[in-house]
Amino acid sequence: MENLIQTKDLRVNFNVQGGFLKDLFSKEKKQVRAVDGIDLDIKKGEILSLVGESGSGKTTTGKAILQLLDQIDGEITYKGQAISHSDRNFIKEFRRKAQMIFQDPYESLNSKFLVIDIVAEPLEINGLIESQERKKEKVKEALEWAGLKPAESYFYRYPHELSGGQRQRVAIAAALILNPEFIVADEPVSMLDVSVRADILRIMVNLRDQKGISYLFITHDISLAWLISDRIAIMYLGKIVEIGDADKVISSSLHPYTKALINVMPKPRVAGQKQKRQVLKGETPNPGNIPKGCRFHTRCPFAEERCQKEEPPLIQYREDHLAACHFAEVLSEGVI
Ligand code: SF4
């Protein structure tokens, strides 16, 4: 499959004022390496999930790819062309073809707008409304793709008159109206009732299958990522620590962090069998103070002295399956 989006050594650094007492009187700003040099490729029609705990840099990565942040280093290419070296027309085209769906449908929709105007807003901004009739047709089509039927019955409602699932469908319709090729979906179902989650995920997969849309699906829930993705990338403190085919990452994970995330996945109970779970210790360290060596060593049950000194590179262990751990090979064979 051909690459649609690529990042090379993508970095996002934020300057923050220290929050501790000793920093209160200091004018010195700390630098947080929110995204610390990542290489990703997202293929046409692919769903790539980016999985990690809160503070891992997932959302920042998504926003950086969409050019929604200023502090970006490294290269982002769209259809093989570097965005930073492109002319305004190319960047404008990229902004139309790359959209975002946010986690919170309550916040992402303008509460004072009617549904028809929320969904048509991207057309308005881009000067693409030819007539009121055409606007209605396009909004209707987008709402139907997002599963709101009959679409016209939603046109003149405000967001507060809709359920959480319906609001997220309106947000999806607004993302679809410009016929995107790529969508960053940032925890799109985490605030919804379990009963509507499957419907929203089904809509996303349908759009991939029928319109060839590619996704960066951001989630903290590795079981959701497994359900929906072609490939999974695991992110920890600003770096990708494992990436590969979704089934392989789940069935033969290489990195201890991935194993810990898999261990907390809900599993069917078998009568008479005790479930042994390795629960991840501690919190994610402060991204302003990334541990030396392997950044996971403060929480890793397999850490050795070498792990405190040497940062493991992300290397390929199996076909299209990479990990950043000094002991990935032996861990995957269950030797340690
Ligand atoms: Fe754990 Fe060491 Fe591997 Fe890091 S390099 S994940 S600390 S075993």
Image (tube, rainbow, N blue to C red):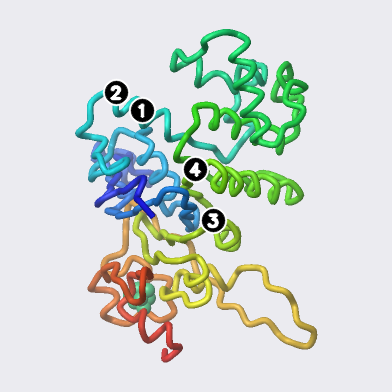
Disc 4: which residue: 213
Question: Three-letter amino acid code at disc 4?
Answer: Ile
Whole-number angstrom distance, CA of label 2 to CA of label 4: 22 Å
Report the quarter where the C terminus lies.
Answer: bottom left
Q: Nearer the viewer, residue 160 or 214?
A: 214
- For label 2, the crowd category at 10 Å Cα-Cα, with few meaning under 14, some 14 to 19 and many 20 or more, is few
Disc nearer the start of the sequence (3/4): 4
Residue at the far bottom in the pictured view: 335
Residue matched to label 1: 93
**Crowd rating for badge 4 (residues with CA inside 10 Å; few <14, some 14–19, many 20+):** many
Q: Residue at 29% across / 38% down in the picture?
A: 25
The CA span between labels 4 and 1 is 16 Å
Q: Measured from the top left, where is residue 231 in percent x and y?
A: 46, 61
Q: Quadrant of the N terminus?
A: bottom left
Q: Is mark 2 within 8 Å of ligand 1?
A: no
* Nearer-the-camera pick, 65 or 44: 44
Residue drawn at 53 percent across, 53 percent down: 219
- The label shown at residue 89 is 2
Residue at 36% x, 68% y is 320
Q: Position of residue 134 (x, y in %)?
A: 59, 14
Q: Which of pointers 3 and 4 indicates the residue nearer the eye?
A: 4
Rounded to the nearest angstrom, the CA distance separating label 3 from label 2 is 35 Å
Q: CA distance from mark 2 to mark 1?
A: 6 Å
**According to the image, label 3 marks what residue?**
220
Looking at the image, tell me whether mark 3 or mark 1 is earlier in sequence order: 1
Give the Cα separation between the discs numbered 3 and 4. Answer: 22 Å
The image quadrant of residue 270 is bottom right
SS class, disc 1:
helix
Up-down: is 296 above or below 204?
below
Question: Where 300 falls versus 289 (above or below)?
Answer: below
Quarter of image, res 121: top right
Mark 3 vs mark 1: in front: 1
